[in-house]
Image (spheres, rainbow, N blue to C red):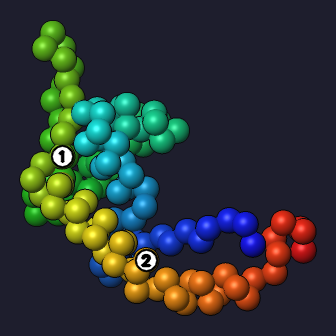
Amino acid sequence: MTSEATLRLRLLFGDQLVLGPGKAELLVRIRDTGSISAAGRAMGMSYKRAWLLVEEMNTAFKLPLVHSARGGAGGGGAALTETGITVLGAYQSMLAATAVACAADIALIAGLLADMAEGK
């Protein structure tokens, strides 16, 4: 088998998806670009979809994860709040710990897979 395994982690409370790979990536891109629209564009999603996800995350937590300022003469922008930085860091930590804890089992499963290159 030639490709690496991908581990995806979704954090649900009840039936509410609080954080998963897409929302975490959006937070990372907002952090890196300072813009919700640029973050959404980089992920191939509409501005409206990116805003809806940010609003969903901000509503799910006691304090917002993203602070945004409208554009205009001084320019707009977005940044992760202290809570946003904490939540993203905790999610990334859980993902890393899960990957380490599951490495042997992932390798075992990978070793039992058919050769995907042959199109079986």
Q: Which quadrant, please, contains the C terminus?
A: bottom right
Residue at mark 1:
80
Q: Is residue 36 left or right of residue 5?
A: left
* Residue position marked by numbered label 2 in the rendering: 99
Question: Looking at the picture, does residue 15 appear above or below residue 26?
Answer: below
Image point (54%, 90%), residue name: 105
x and y percentages locating residue 50 in the rendered image: 38, 42
Kindly check if marks 1 and 2 are in contact, taking CB atoms under 8 A apart as contact.
no
- Residue under the point 49% across and 83% down: 103
Q: Position of residue 51 (x, y in %)?
A: 33, 41
Q: Residue at x 35, y 57 (%)?
A: 24
Quadrant in the picture for residue 109: bottom right
Q: Is residue 99 left or right of residue 67?
A: right
User: Could you say which is closer to the camera, residue 40 or residue 114?
Assistant: 114
* SS label for mark 1: strand
Residue found at x 90% / y 68%: 118
Q: Nearer the viewer, residue 68 or 56?
A: 68
In the rendered image, which quarter contains the N terminus?
A: bottom right
Q: Amino acid at mark 1?
A: Leu
Q: How many marks?
A: 2
Q: In terms of depth relative to the viewer, which is nearer, 56 or 111?
A: 111
State the image quarter where residue 47 is shown. Answer: top left
Measured as percent of width and height from the top left, residue 99 is found at 43, 77
Q: Is residue 17 above or below residue 71?
A: below
Element type where label 2 sits in the image: helix
Spot occupied by residue 14 in the image (x, y as percentages of width and height) = 33, 81
Question: Is disc 1 surrounded by few (<14), some (14 to 19) or many (20+) residues within 10 Å?
Answer: many
Q: Is residue 109 above or below residue 44?
A: below
Q: Is residue 118 left or right of residue 34?
A: right
Give the CA distance from mark 1 to mark 2. Answer: 25 Å
